[in-house]
Amino acid sequence: MTVDRKELRLGVIGLSEGNGHPYSWSAIFNGYDPEYMKDCPFPVIPQYLSERSFPSDTIKGATVTHIWTQDEAVSRHIAKASKIQTVCQKMEDMIGQVDAVLLARDDAENHLAMSTPFLSAGLPIFIDKPLALNVKEGNKILALQQYKDQVFSCTALRFAQEFVLSPTLKKKLGGLMAVKAVSPKSWEKYAVHIIEPVYTLLSQEEFPVKVDQVIKIEDTVEVKAQTQGGIQLEFVTTGSKSGKLFIEIQGSRSSTKLIFQDAFSAFRSSLQYFVDLIGGKAKNIPRKQTLEIVQLIEEGIK
């Protein structure tokens, strides 16, 4: 379904622990108030917003008009910081008032319950990464769709320019032989940040991926796998150990290390894609790929 409206009205839902997306995603659409945003509990957000030019860097054609979080005081602060007009007492209150929903929580165990009323109402919904922590629940969410492509879900790092291989770099690397991707923080929330960008580097002939080994030491999780063509894959989340998120690629001719740096651009690109999808200007991510990513996440949780 496409929404034929010059200016889309979006509702944003949050807030999960350690996740500032309701602040940042809303600001990318609406702009922001520096006086309130400086008190955002995620200092990196006002920092990277201040490095951009507003309103020129906002996404055109859509505005976040409604917000709900489980804490009204938090909702009101986000609304002031990110210029959101309406604070909802219940998340369901935005049904009938918005054209689409941003479920900006990365606690995937709550995605099914929180998306259900909006799916039932026929609203397009962007479900923050990961869609689910297991394939069974992912399929339950998708089964609630009232029409094709009602659900959009991905990590913004799928669109990170740092992880795009130029034709020149591809030629320099040669054929892919091995890929190692590393992220700080937990497997449940952050594995998708490294799995999905790697999946976009591989051809469809390489799937499904076969898991060879899962290693867990304290809060570090390492999953070793291989593709159908024998490319060796290694995904690591380092838990409480800090560090950069990166992807190392070993080709038949040379190797390279790609380091993620620009969160704003990645977020903006993913949100723009959702708007384009609603407007019929973009194709959704193949469901098969999304569920294969969820399957690999599930393997690391077992």
Image: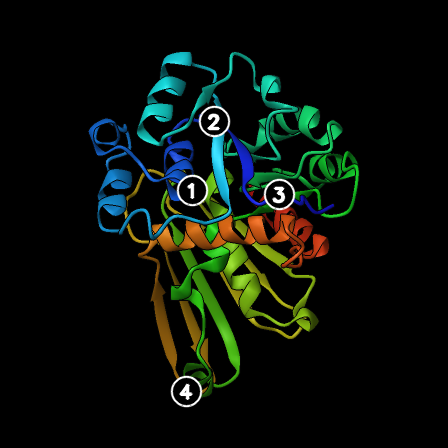
Q: What distance separates the C-alpha of mark 2 from that of mark 3? A: 25 Å
- Mark with earlier residue (1, 4): 1
**N-term mark: 1 or 2:** 2
Name the amino acid type tagged 4.
Lys
Q: Name the residue beneath numbered marker 2.
A: 14
- Residue in the image at 57% along x and 45% along y: 6
Q: Is residue 177 above or below residue 274?
A: below
Q: Is residue 291 visible?
A: yes
Q: Which residue is mark 1?
A: 29
Assign a secondary structure to mark 1.
helix
Residue labelled with disc 3: 5
Say which of marks 4 and 2 sits in front: 2
Determine whether label 3 and label 4 are within 8 Å by CB.
no
Residue 302 in view (yes/no): no
Q: Quadrant of the C terminus?
A: top right
Check contact, mark 2 vs mark 3: CB within 8 A.
Answer: no
What's the colour scheme?
rainbow
- What residue is pinned by disc 4? 172
Indicate the position of residue 246 as horizontal and vertical percent values. 37, 59
Looking at the image, is mark 1 or mark 3 earlier in the sequence? 3
Q: Which image quarter: residue 9?
A: top right
Q: How far is mark 4 from mark 2, CA to CA?
A: 43 Å
